[in-house]
Amino acid sequence: MKVEFWSDIVCPWCYIGKRRFEKALSQFEHGKEVEVIWRSFELDPSTPRESGDLVAALSKKMGRSADEVKQMMAQITNLAAQDGLEYRFDLTKNENTFDAHRLIHFASDQGLVEKINEHLYRAYFTEGVTVSDNEALVQVAVKAGLDENATREMLASDKYSEDVRSDESRAHSLKVSGVPFVLANEKYAISGAQSTEVFLDALRQAWNDAHPITVVGGAGNSCDDGNCLI
C-alpha cells in the first residue's frame, strides 16, 4: 500500500504529524507492507536564502504582534512535548527549505530518507541548525549516513530540483493548501497533524478498501447473532 506524506522541514505541525503517523504505522497490522513516500512542500518558496528572524517574519505574515507569535510558539512547544519532541523556537530562524527538500530526494535514492527526515527536523527545531545553508545540510546528511562528498556535490548542482517541483505540482493538483497532508492509496486523505488514532483508522480503511474479502462457496449452514437453526 502506498502512502504519500507532504510536509515542510520548518513546519512545526509536520514534525508532530510525522511522529503521530509513525506511531500509527507501528501499530498497523500491515505496517511492513506500506510504502511511505515523502513529498516536498514549501510553506513559503519566496523565503530568502539568508536566514532571518522567525518571530518578525511570522508576525508580518500572520498580521499578529510579536507577543502573540511568541505565545503561539509556547503553545505548540507544549503540544510537541506531549509527543516527545523538543522545540527550541529561541534558536530557530526563518529559513528557505528548497535545498533541504532536494537533500531529502537525494537521501531517498540512497535508501536513507527516513533518517534524513528525522535528522533535518531535529536539526531545525531542537538544535537551531540553519537548514538553508548547504554546508550545514552536509553536516546533517553525514549524521544521517550519507556520503559527505556526494552530498556536497549534489547540493552544488541543481539535481532533484524537478523532483521538488513535481511534488509541489502534484500537491497543487490535489488542492493541498497546507501541510502535513497524507494520502493513502490515492483515495484516503488526512489533512493536518491528526491524532495517532485518526492516522491508524485511515490506514486500516485504505488497506481494507484495497483488499476486499471475497466469500467463496455462497451461503452455507452457520450460526449468527447467537442463534443457530438446527
Image (cartoon, rainbow, N blue to C red):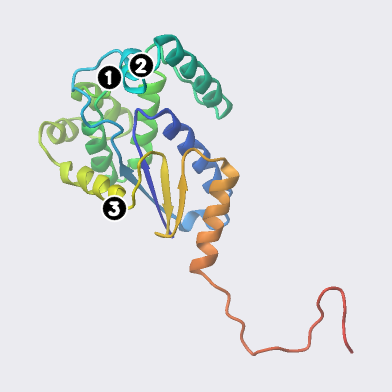
User: Is residue 186 at all visible to an observer of this figure?
Assistant: yes
Most extreme residue toward the front, as rendered?
Answer: 63
In the image, residue 25 above or below residue 187? above
Question: Mark 2 and mark 3: span between their CA atoms?
Answer: 30 Å
Q: Earlier in the sequence, mark 2 or mark 3?
A: 2
Q: Amino acid at mark 2?
A: Ser
Query: In the picture shown, does residue 50 fall above or below 186?
Result: above
- The residue lying at 57 percent from left, 47 percent from top is 198
Picture mark count: 3
Q: Position of residue 110 (x, y in %)?
A: 27, 44
Q: Nearer the viewer, residue 206 or 171?
A: 171
Mark 2: secondary structure: helix
Residue position marked by numbered label 1 in the rendering: 130
Name the residue beneath numbered marker 2.
59
Answer few, some or many: residues within 10 Å of disc 1's Cα (few below 14, many 20 plus, some between 14 and 19): many
Q: Residue at x 53, y 47 (%)?
A: 199
* Dot 3 amino acid type: Ser
Q: Quadrant of the N terminus?
A: bottom left
Mark 1 residue element: loop
CA distance separating discs 1 and 3:
31 Å
Q: Which residue is mark 3?
A: 173
Instruction: Please name the residue shown 46% across and 20% down the image.
Output: 87
State left or right for residue 115 relative to residue 204.
left
Q: Give the residue type at disc 1.
A: Thr
Image quarter (top left, top right, bottom left or bottom right) of the C terminus: bottom right
| Neighbours of disc 3 within 10 Å: few (<14), some (14-19), many (20+) | few
Give whichever of 45, 142 is nearer the camera. Answer: 45
